[in-house]
Amino acid sequence: MAATRTMMRYGGRRWFTSCSSRALRWWDHVGPASKDPITGAIEAFLADPSPAKINLGVGAYRDDEGKPVVLQCVREAEAKVAGSDYLESVSSCLGSKMVEESVKLVYGEDSFVFREQRFAGIQALSGTGACRLFAELQRRFYPDSEIYLPDLTWSNHHNIWRDAGVSRRTFRYYDPETKGLNFSALLDDIKNAPSGSFFLLHPCAHNPTGVDPTEEQWREISSMFKVKRHFPFFDMAYQGFASGCLVKDALSVRIFLEDGHLIGCAQSFAKNMGLYGHRVGCLSVLANNTVQASMMRSQLQQIARSMYGSPPMHGLLLVSTILTNLEIKALWERELKVMTKRVQTMRTALREELEKLGSSLNWQHVTNQVGMFCFSGLAPNEVERLRKEFHIYMTIDGRLSMAGVTPSNTTYIANAIHQVTRERARM
């Protein structure tokens, strides 16, 4: 393409600029980013024209008909805030109230954490944003530290700490042979990590495996953390989704609290309130005293300011209303139990259907695991066959969302899984 000359006047002088094809070729070296496994599964599902397709990759709750659910507690909160003339100047006040109620939710209503104001808390952009804020805090004040992530964990955890410039290591967690917790290996890795290391823990409804430690195992983990002086950071994405009880699902965090640990915790209301698109979350980091808490809070606010300024307000209004209104909060807790019960019922139904088909494989893990996801044990080639032959979509590692399993498709899903695993079952 021929170059063109453009005359510009600047400071009384004439300047000529040349525009050529070469000058316009910015970003030629940029290639496509690697596909996120969850996004990739959803995109493949959307591109499939089959009317019989089933999405088992989605991480948000669905009802018995496979449709998204707006909780009644959210509708009632929406009615209370609709039409209200909230000014930007009050958003910080509302944010503080939401943070306080979130802290009570995870550490306990009567916890000294709130009573003595020994926490630095900030509203975050859901759980992802809360993790990212903490990763940046870790990098700034412990620049030579690493983060130990469970093997396996939510794939985005690696992206978050990598992009914050924090080195990542893994500790053993899931045992593919038993499809359960590799507890002895987990303890060994905690013991052998350098003293004073940062560890990310899933307090309940582990994503993607659905495998949680028992209460006694959590106590052993906490005890080893104390010996090694490790820092525990909890990513609480599914409080209420493991057992249906908010208090029970926070037990792991409270065990660490009782043992005297300082703790970091990311909370998300995307899943347990069905507010995925509103991006409402909270980050709290415990401190030794109120002075330290105040200084840490100022640092978190500065980090957030440079990243996104302030979070959106509508979701904040909804969450604040649900957490502060006793009647609406009680309604939310009842709805959590209903959602959890549905998922547990579908686990039982799927396992029973697989066993009815005469599969020689052991499907006990389907009901042993908890929370939104089932780590099925399906191999990548079996997942591919489910896509191509049966139009069933899940992540390539075999993680399927139990929210996508419904009374009307359980038999079809079980039969498809049986078909693609028959060869392995005969070995």
Image (tube, grey):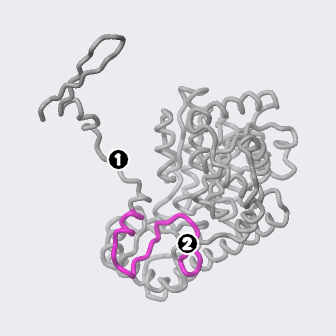
Judged by depth in the image, the label closer to the viewer, 2 or 1, is 1
Question: Residue 259, image x and y in percent?
Answer: 77, 43
Label 2 vs label 1: CA separation? Answer: 29 Å
For the point 27% across and 14% down, the residue is 14
Of residues 151 and 228, the one nearer the viewer is: 151
In the image, residue 336 above or below residue 106: below
Please give left or right for residue 173 compared with residue 112 in the image. left
Residue 43 on the magenta segment = yes
In the image, residue 393 above or below residue 146: below
Question: Residue 346, image x and y in percent?
Answer: 57, 79
> What is the quadrant of the C terminus in the image?
bottom left
* Magenta-colored segment: predominant secondary structure: loop
Q: Secondary structure at mark 1?
A: loop
User: Which numbered disc covers residue 403?
Assistant: 2
Question: Residue 378, image x and y in percent?
Answer: 41, 69
**Amino acid type, callout 1:** Ala
For the point 57% across and 52% down, the residue is 184
In the image, residue 190 above or below residue 248: above
> What is the quadrant of the N terminus in the image?
top left
Question: Residue 272, image x and y in percent?
Answer: 66, 62
Q: Which residue is mark 1?
A: 33
Please give left or right for residue 369 compared with residue 256 in the image. left
Magenta stretch bounds: 41-67
In the image, residue 321 above or below residue 131: below
**Amino acid type, callout 2:** Ala
